[in-house]
Amino acid sequence: MKHPSFVISIQSQVVLGHVGNSAALFPMQAAGLEVAAIPTVVFSNTPHYPTLRGRALPPDFFADLLLGAQERGLPERADYILTGYIGSLEVAEMIADFVTQAKAVNPRLTYLCDPVMGDDGPGLYVPETIADLMRGRLLPLADIATPNLFELRWLTGHKIRTLADLKAAGEALHIAPAGHLIATGCALDDTPKGMIESVVFGPDGISRHPIEHLPIALPGTGDLFAGLIVAGLGCGRSLADTVDTAQTLTSSALSQANAVGAGEVVLSAPEFRSALLTLDTE
């Protein structure tokens, strides 16, 4: 019997809603992956509600969770590490140390860094010190990075309007050798009207993945997409096929949220759940 892929997912958690691990954990598990979820922050809800409770994990508490993961041998077992939103510089530094050590003891490990730090609407929503650490320590470790266009522009200082601009920005990001950049939410000069695309850069070339542009901006979209990328790869799919599937399912979650008036992506639609259950069989 084939053993399921094992993922360590280090990102935010909320009581209500679907962002961070509260968005990424379900699709990975539904696709058949085994996931160890480590929170960086625990909040009552996303910030768009009138009140927000909870906080970033205290550094000593977070360090204890990482130590427990090491004591259980999780870095040696893991096929993937996924990181997302980070709430404090101290925690960001510990994550960089943890990923560095995990890759040293487990060379087959794939690290996906989703540099959750901002978007065109709100701008940068983490302190610049955290964004700088992502650029200087986490992204150079990444075998796969999934920045949106705002994050890629901020991290590299490049203006991005064309595919050539995007390629230059990707090279300036300095992810791990032989790594793949998935630039999300791209609307380039030659992107077909009414579409938005993810563009993948890697040693095997460039691939473009357009999809209908839905005028819906909701928390959790990028977190869900990154989780779906790990889910697809963990089920043995190619990266190109995984990106297409992740875009389709993310779009489905956005459409469902829009249909029911939800403030975050919706993961409960029967079609969405059915697609996850068949990721490892198609």
Image: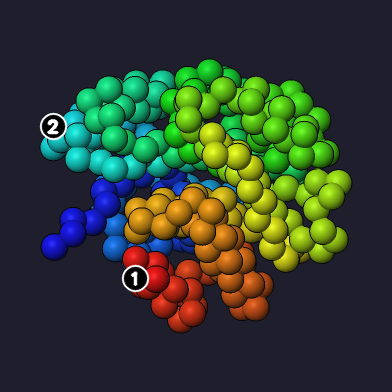
Rendered location of residue 191, percent (x, y): 80, 53
Residue wearing tag 2: 71
* For residue 149, above or below residue 220: above
CA–CA distance between discs 2 and 1? 34 Å
The single residue placed furthest to the bottom in the displayed view is 270
Is 262 placed left or right of 122 in the picture?
left
Residue 24, by quadrant, is bottom left
The reply to whether discs 2 and 1 touch (Cβ–Cβ < 8 Å) is: no
Give the camera-side residue of 217 and 205. 205
Which residue is drawn at the image coordinates 30% and 46% (left, top)? Answer: 7
Which residue is drawn at the image coordinates 70% and 33% (left, top)? Answer: 167
The amino acid at mark 1 is: Thr
Residue 158, by quadrant, is top right
* For residue 134, above or below residue 197: above
Residue wearing tag 1: 281
Give the camera-side residue of 249 and 51. 249
Rendered location of residue 73, percent (x, y): 15, 35
Is 33 placed left or right of 169 in the picture?
left
Give the camera-side residue of 206 and 45. 206
Residue 103, by quadrant, is top left
Q: Which type of secondary structure does the marked residue at label 2 adopt?
A: helix
Is residue 69 among what the camera can see?
no
Q: Residues within 10 Å of mark 1 (few under 14, many from 20)?
A: few
The amino acid at mark 2 is: Glu
**Badge 2 or badge 1: first in the primary sequence:** 2
Give the foreground label among 2 and 1: 1
Q: Which type of secondary structure does the marked residue at label 1 adopt?
A: loop
Which residue is drawn at the image coordinates 71% and 27% (left, top)? Answer: 168
Give the camera-side residue of 166 and 157. 166
Rendered location of residue 93, percent (x, y): 41, 21
